[in-house]
Amino acid sequence: MAQRLLIRCHHKTKDENETTDLQDPDCRHRPLLAAPALAAPVLFAALPWDSNSDAENMSAVFGATGFTNYTNYKLAATDANSIFSAANRFVMLEGGADTDAALAGYLGQYGAIIDAWVQGGGALLIQSAGWYNNISFKDVNLTMNASGCGTLTAAGAAAFTTAVSQCGGSLAHDLISGSGLTTYMTGSAGGAIVAGKEFGKGYIMYSGLTTSNFHSSGPSLSQSVIRYTAAQAGEVPEPASIALLAAGIAAIGAMRRRSAR
């Protein structure tokens, strides 16, 4: 049976910090068909560089009606518990350009929920080619340092269907560092620009790539990263189990902070 999904849209009001849902023909609540092999993917992308490339790439991978699209992190915040649940196995969080602060804030606020969901089998793609903020999650860092070009590693060539070497303007803004990572692409700035790691039963892919409209070789790299990451998902547990795990993770974090004082 097809699953009912909801596209969440917004427009900016006179106060650009306020958002409202649109009900125009291109953004109406309507039933969407979940992708048959990868259930209910979710995209968070607040149109970095005013580009809709992320949504276009999700459409290419999952079908135009095969995913839920949040174009504002405030809208997504109201649905955090339902997004990071057993119903969804793949989530992409975009933080390119000036949306890096919103991504950092969302990870900080909902980190325990996201962590528990990944540990339980969720596949997460964190992408940030930011302007102002470095991004950290699960002891992995995305640090601002632009690369005009990139080269796939052996792991990347095996995982992705795209050119081994390609450039852009820029191809990536961030370098990725952390222990235990598999590097899929290195950048001309001298480090990983796409790298991932298993966490529990799930997987996190970290990407410093810009949106694909800047890639000279077209969208194949971005689409490959999305497709491969989504395929790493395991069986995500039911919401009650995720809630218990999230509470445990939060408690451990609090104990570490107290012991550090």
Image (tube, helix red, strand yellow):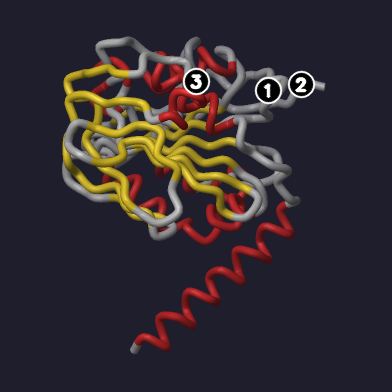
Task: Name the residue located 66 percent from the left edge and 52 percent from the top edge.
Answer: 120
Q: Quadrant of the N terminus?
A: top right
Seen as rendered, the residue at the extreme front is 154
Q: Is residue 4 left or right of residue 211?
A: right
Q: Indicate the position of residue 127 as horizontal and vertical percent values.
A: 37, 37
> In 3D space, how far apart are the residues under numbered discs 3 and 1 (Cα atoms)?
12 Å
Q: Which residue is mark 3?
A: 58
Q: State if disc 2 and disc 1 touch (CB < 8 Å).
A: yes
Q: Is residue 144 left or right of residue 69?
A: left
Task: Name the residue located 56 percent from the left edge and 53 percent from the top edge.
Answer: 199
Q: Which residue is mark 1?
A: 34
Q: Earlier in the sequence, mark 3 or mark 1?
A: 1
Task: Name the residue located 36 percent from the left edge and 55 percent from the top edge.
Answer: 178
> In 3D space, how far apart are the residues under numbered discs 3 and 2 (Cα atoms)?
18 Å
- Decide: is 47 above or below 246: above
Residue 31 visible in this rendered orientation of the protein? no
Q: Residues within 10 Å of mark 3 (few under 14, many from 20)?
A: many
Q: Indicate the position of residue 8 as horizontal and vertical percent values.
A: 50, 29
Q: Which residue is mark 2?
A: 2
Q: State if disc 1 and disc 3 touch (CB < 8 Å).
A: no
Q: Residues within 10 Å of mark 1 (few under 14, many from 20)?
A: many
Residue 211 visible in this rendered orientation of the protein? yes
- Decide: is 80 above or below 245: above
Label 1 sits on what residue type? Ala
Q: Indicate the position of residue 116 as horizontal and vertical percent values.
A: 60, 57
At mark 2, the secondary structure is loop
In terms of depth relative to the viewer, which is nearer, 161 or 19?
A: 161
Q: Earlier in the sequence, mark 3 or mark 2?
A: 2
Q: Indicate the position of residue 133 as horizontal and vertical percent values.
A: 22, 49
Label 2 sits on what residue type? Ala
> In 3D space, how far apart are the residues under numbered discs 1 and 2 (Cα atoms)?
6 Å
